[in-house]
Amino acid sequence: MNPSTAATVGGVTNHDIITIIASFSGDLSSMTAPPFILSPVSLTEFPAYWCERPELFAAIADAKSDEDRALAVLKWFISTLKGQYTSRNDTMGSEKKPLNPVLGELFYGMWPDKGGRGQTDLLVEQVSHHPPITAYVIENKAKGLKLVGHNAQKTSFSGGSIIVKQIGHAILTVKNLSASSASGSPPVTEYLITLPRLRIDGLWYGSPYIELCETSYIVGGGFVSTVEYKGKGYFSGKSHSFKATVSPAPGAPGREHVIEGLWHTTSKFVKGGVSGKGDFHDVNGPKEEVTVVAGGGGGDGVPEGEMGEFETRKLWKLVAKGIREGDFESASREKGRIEVGLVVCCFIRELTRIAVVVVMVLQFFWNMQNEQRQRRRDEVAAGTSWALKHFTPIASDPIYERLSVLAKIQPPTEDAYVFLDNWPKTSPVSSA
Ligand code: CLR
């Protein structure tokens, strides 16, 4: 990323400096984060990144063979990475601390049908607060596609960066809509999708951004895709590099494909490929943001079009407004600062900005420890269990167990949240 452009968006203002100093009582956990490092978006909105190219998701259903489908799933997956991991830098200047969802928080959305690709629906529920776990479903009924997954993070600090291990996985189910009893093809094909490890770099410049590392897998439908991630200075020398190998699962027929490129722009086949086509994915074109819908009750008697108290956009409305206005203020002052051209003043502000990010990182780990303590307290205070609306937890996921062995994925089993298949009656909300 480019620290100099990041620095001109939502920088530190004199006002920020005064508030930060005035609010500091010596207790790190009591320090209020300045708006420039906070994002007004709750983590429950993040699962929408999985479908910002709905046509690529729908294309999975149109594949003609197992091999084609494995490539279509990989293409859709790789094409989500730009949104998942670089979009805050693109829209807000740097990676920021998202709002930490409350237990039971809900987010509903959809992507409309266009050109016969079918409507895709999104449902998200915060299924745990300590530790934070988010469960989601993305379904395109017309195409017989369903993605169910959950997400948690385990963070640590290494070599000046925050390392985020993603815990959880997703299962993509592809229904064979044309399956007749005679065709011999299975009625559903399941894919296990695991998630990459992240490194948050740029902390010492005060401009955090994400680099992906290590390996993630997509296993199912007779194929295993292994995606290796590398940053600057590794195989291509460029940041956001990846190399994906699609090979037949042990004992299954088919060819091997190898793809290399940059996940935030384009990639090419370096081995295999389909009918002479060298290009694999390209995410330079526009993406489609989710349309938020109110589902706060639908079936529960709440008037349609009205959001329930636990729906993300309503729940965080005032907080988000505060963060946005804080940012707006700094953005407009930033403009003034450039016009005046006070180099010394800028320099001091830059230093403060970096110091504040460092303090926020420290605070982040401090809070994590407190959270551990809180968790133990929560466990002791039994009896008060919150009823989840859309999911049931299971201790081990049989689909994960069956597919993970094919790529020797560790651990051999994981817990999961089973979707109750109770879509609410939702209605579009104006984006205003
Ligand atoms: C959530 C699941 C999404 C992908 C994704 C992208 C960005 C990640 C986020 C996940 C989890 C929370 C996260 C965030 C980037 C920064 C943020 C790790 C994995 C942490 C909590 C904030 C760090 C604070 C510094 C920026 C100061 O599919």
Image: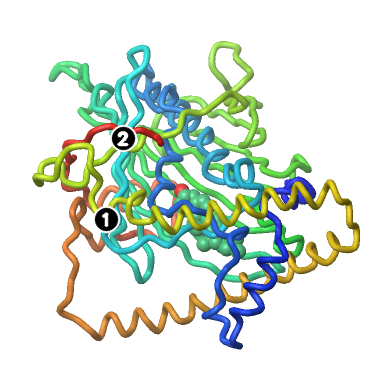
Q: Residues within 10 Å of mark 2 (few under 14, many from 20)?
A: some
For mark 2, what is the residue? 429
Sooner in the amino-acid sequence: mark 2 or mark 1 = 1
Q: Residue at x 85, y 63 (%)?
A: 345
Q: Residues within 10 Å of mark 1 (few under 14, many from 20)?
A: some
**Residue 213 visible to an observer of this rendering:** no
The spot of residue 348 in percent (x, y) is 83, 67
Mark 1: which amino acid?
Phe
Mark 2: which amino acid?
Val
Q: Is residue 270 left or right of residue 257?
A: right
The spot of residue 373 in percent (x, y) is 40, 84
Q: Is residue 284 left or right of residue 412?
A: right
Asked if the residue under mark 1 is in contact with the one under mark 2, i.e. CB atoms within 8 Å, the reply is: no
Within 8 Å of ligand 1, the CB of disc 1? no
Compared with 175, 312 (above or below) is below
Report the Cα–Cα distance between label 2 and label 1: 16 Å
Which of the 4 quarters of the picture holds residue 67? Answer: top left
> Which residue occupies the foreground of this view, 365 or 196?
365
Display coloring: rainbow
The spot of residue 135 in percent (x, y) is 32, 52
Q: Residue at x 64, y 74 (%)?
A: 20
For mark 1, what is the residue? 310
Compared with 405, 50 (above or below) is above
Residue situated furthest bottom in the rendering: 26
**Residue 72 visible to an observer of this rendering:** yes
- Quarter of the figure that contains the C terminus: top left
Q: Residue at x 70, y 56 (%)?
A: 11
